[in-house]
Amino acid sequence: MTSRQAIDQTPSFSSLDDENQDLEGLASASMADSDDRPLREAVIFAMRRYFNHLDGGTVTDLHAMVLAEVEAPLLSSVLEHTNGNQTRAAEMLGLNRGTLRKKLKHYDLI
């Protein structure tokens, strides 16, 4: 899959359905417990909690939903860290600057 296809298939935040809202607030709900938790463990914790809240419901397009939830704050944080310098941000992320700009526009970050 190309990066363009991934962007086109990633739903916007406004189109996420109600069951996806379970992931919102996970960071604040468990912030005290997760300050020292590695990112990998935080993701595992979040996904387990998400599946527990499904309560037998079904979910589709989980990959795109998770990427949308993670990618936007990642881009925002790196851009903040580089004081808005998109060239440095792209280098940090290992992305082409044009790809970074496309993603920033997709998430309405520029």
Image: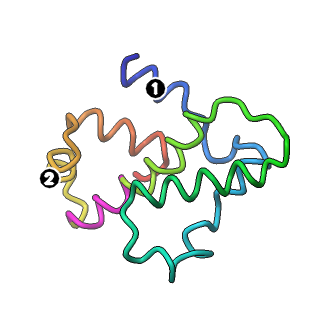
Give the SS element for disc 2: helix
Please rate how many residues cluster around mark 1, counting C-alpha atoms within 10 Å: few if below 14, some from 14 to 19, many from 20. few
Judged left or right of residue 10, residue 54 is right
- In the picture, which quadrant includes the N terminus? top left
Q: Position of residue 10 (x, y in %)?
A: 55, 32
Mark 1, mark 2: which one is toward the viewer? 1
Residue 78: within the magenta?
yes
* As drawn, 94 above or below 2: below
Q: Farthest top residue?
A: 1
Q: Position of residue 34 (x, y in %)?
A: 47, 74
Q: Which residues are magenta?
A: 75-82
Q: Residue at x 20, y 63 (%)?
A: 82
Of residues 9 and 40, the one nearer the viewer is 40
Q: Which residue is mark 2?
A: 88
Q: Amino acid at mark 1?
A: Ala
Q: Which residue is mark 1?
A: 6
Q: Residue at x 29, y 59 (%)?
A: 79
> Dots 1 and 2: beta carbons under 8 Å?
no
* As drawn, 91 above or below 9: below
Q: Amino acid at mark 2?
A: Arg
Q: Earlier in the sequence, mark 1 or mark 2?
A: 1
- Residue 36, quarter of the rendered image: bottom left
- Residue 11, quarter of the rendered image: top right
